[in-house]
Image (spheres, helix red, strand yellow):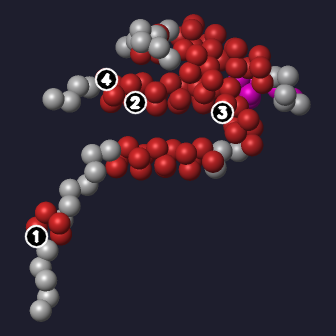
Amino acid sequence: MERKLPYYMAYPTPLLYDDERIERRDLEYMKSMYPDTAKRALPYVEDECDRMEYEGSMLYDEYPDKLQLALMCGRIYGKMEKEEEEPGEWLRDLIQVMLYQEVCKRRCDHRKYKRKFY
């Protein structure tokens, strides 16, 4: 005789944070496909964002200060230009795009974690 499963075992509800795990895995996979120069720039971008990530940081302002973002890009460029053979405007542009993307991701994560669950 075939044994029937209760409804709650046959159709379990998905884990609450499973979506977050999938998003994180997708992001890591996409980062692994970056070109070589972007892979070398990524640790500098993440370190700079880590340094600026604290409660009340300008990263979480409604409109982040363009000058502060430009200064962050300048610090990253200063560290990277020593390593690159032909640094130029292309490297500044790459760093700027990567920094803005990382800031956007962190702002979204901050909004998600800031919510209170009751």
The magenta region covers 86-93
- Name the residue beneath numbered marker 4: 114
The answer to whether the residues at label 3 and label 4 have Cβ atoms under 8 Å apart is no
Q: Amino acid at mark 3?
A: Leu
Could you tell which of marks 3 and 2 lies nearer the N-terminus? 3
| Nearer the camera: disc 3 or disc 4 | 4
* Gap between marks 2 and 1 measured at Cα: 37 Å
Q: Amino acid at mark 2?
A: Asp
Closest to the observer, 18 or 39: 18
The answer to whether the residues at label 3 and label 1 have Cβ atoms under 8 Å apart is no
| Nearer the camera: disc 4 or disc 1 | 1
* Gap between marks 2 and 4 measured at Cα: 8 Å
The answer to whether the residues at label 2 and label 4 have Cβ atoms under 8 Å apart is no
Question: Which residue is located at x 57 percent, y 8 percent?
Answer: 68
Question: Which residue is located at x 14 percent, y 88 percent?
Answer: 2
Relative to residue 116, is residue 8 drawn left or right? Answer: left
Q: Which mark is residue 42?
A: 3
- Name the residue beneath numbered marker 1: 6
